[in-house]
């Protein structure tokens, strides 16, 4: 599946390598070497279908670029893969907190990045036939509108957090391994770290508050969404 990819990378040689490789894969590639240029390119018409965003930029941190994209109506659902040389847990948590959908650490293979981009595009191009609202205890989820409520209060989730919650809810009572979630939610079939799943589940639970108890951790196995809300 081809699409438009925005590469945000201040290292000129690396940006050129990524541009060449992704262009050969059939993507339309735009390169931005700064945060301001990235924001302008993301809001252009037509805009990108996915953004590959470096964390360390000369003017605006990549986390701030990501935050601004998530705050703008046109780019709120835009898939973002964050690329950085930082590999500490706090860096990953901050990246996901501001709205990144995926996280790769330098040095990474171009093939791995291309696989992640393809997975992002495959998910973002899926269309739903009709609106579907799921209710479970205090939780209400509107699949088509990508909206979530606890009681009457709306909860703001990133696009990936929403997909994760919907996957759990639509498979309630069934065990979901981390590998299965990486494949079904992230669209990644390669052997990559499953800590990404744990980080997102932790953030999702925090945003859901008491309702986060609907998601159970099964040590050594994975996760399971309760089959009855009153069990929580």
Image (tube, rainbow, N blue to C red):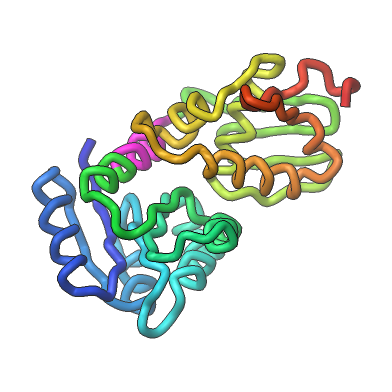
Percent position of residue 196, x then y: 52, 44
Question: How many callouts does the rendering have?
Answer: 0
Q: Would you say 192 lies left or right of 226 here? A: left
Toward which corner of the image does residue 124 lie, by quadrant? top left
Residue 74 visible from this viewpoint? no
The answer to whether residue 92 is left or right of residue 2 is: right
Residue located at (29% from left, 53% from top): 108
Is residue 165 inside the magenta stretch?
Answer: no
Q: Is residue 79 above or below residue 135?
A: below
Name the residue at 64% across, 34% down: 165
Residue 198's spot in the image, x, y percent?
A: 61, 41
215 sits left or right of 143 in the view: right
Which quadrant is the N terminus positioned in?
top left
Q: Is residue 36 above or below residue 67?
A: below
Magenta-highlighted stretch: main secondary structure? helix
Q: Which residues are magenta?
A: 118-127
Percent across and percent down for residue 74 are: 45, 59
Rendered position, 188 above or below 136: below
Quadrant of res 62: bottom left
| Front in this rendered view, residue 109 or 52 | 109
x then y, percent, for residue 145: 59, 39
Identified at 13% across, 44% down, the residue is 26
> In terms of image quadrants, where is residue 164?
top right
Quarter of the image that includes the C terminus: top right
Give the side of residue 52 with respect to residue 183, left or right: left
Residue at 15 percent across and 70 percent down: it is 13
- Nearer to us in this view, 159 or 164: 164
Asked whether residue 122 is drawn in magenta, I would say yes
């Amino acid at each position: 599946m081809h699409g438009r990819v925005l590469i945000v990378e201040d290292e000129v040689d690396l940006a050129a390598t990524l541009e060449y490789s992704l262009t050969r894969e059939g993507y339309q590639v735009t390169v931005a070497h700064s945060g301001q240029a990235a924001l302008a390119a993301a809001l252009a018409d037509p805009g990108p279908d996915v953004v590959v965003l470096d964390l360390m930029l000369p003017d605006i941190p990549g986390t701030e670029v990501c935050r601004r994209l998530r705050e703008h109506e046109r780019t709120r659902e835009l898939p973002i893969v964050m690329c950085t040389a930082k590999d500490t847990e706090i860096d990953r948590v901050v990246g996901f907190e501001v709205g990144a959908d995926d996280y790769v650490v330098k040095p990474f293979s171009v093939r791995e990045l291309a696989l992640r981009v393809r997975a992002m595009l495959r998910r973002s191009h899926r269309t739903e036939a009709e609106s579907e609202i799921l209710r479970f205890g205090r939780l209400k989820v509107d699949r088509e509108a990508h909206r979530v409520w606890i009681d009457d209060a709306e909860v703001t989730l990133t696009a990936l957090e929403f997909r994760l919650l919907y996957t759990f809810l639509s498979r309630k009572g069934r065990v979901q391994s981390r590998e299965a979630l990486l494949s079904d939610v992230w669209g990644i079939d390669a052997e990559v770290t499953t800590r990404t799943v744990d980080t997102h589940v932790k953030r999702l639970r925090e945003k859901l508050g008491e309702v986060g108890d609907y998601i159970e951790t099964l040590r050594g196995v994975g996760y399971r969404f309760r089959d009855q809300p009153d069990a929580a």
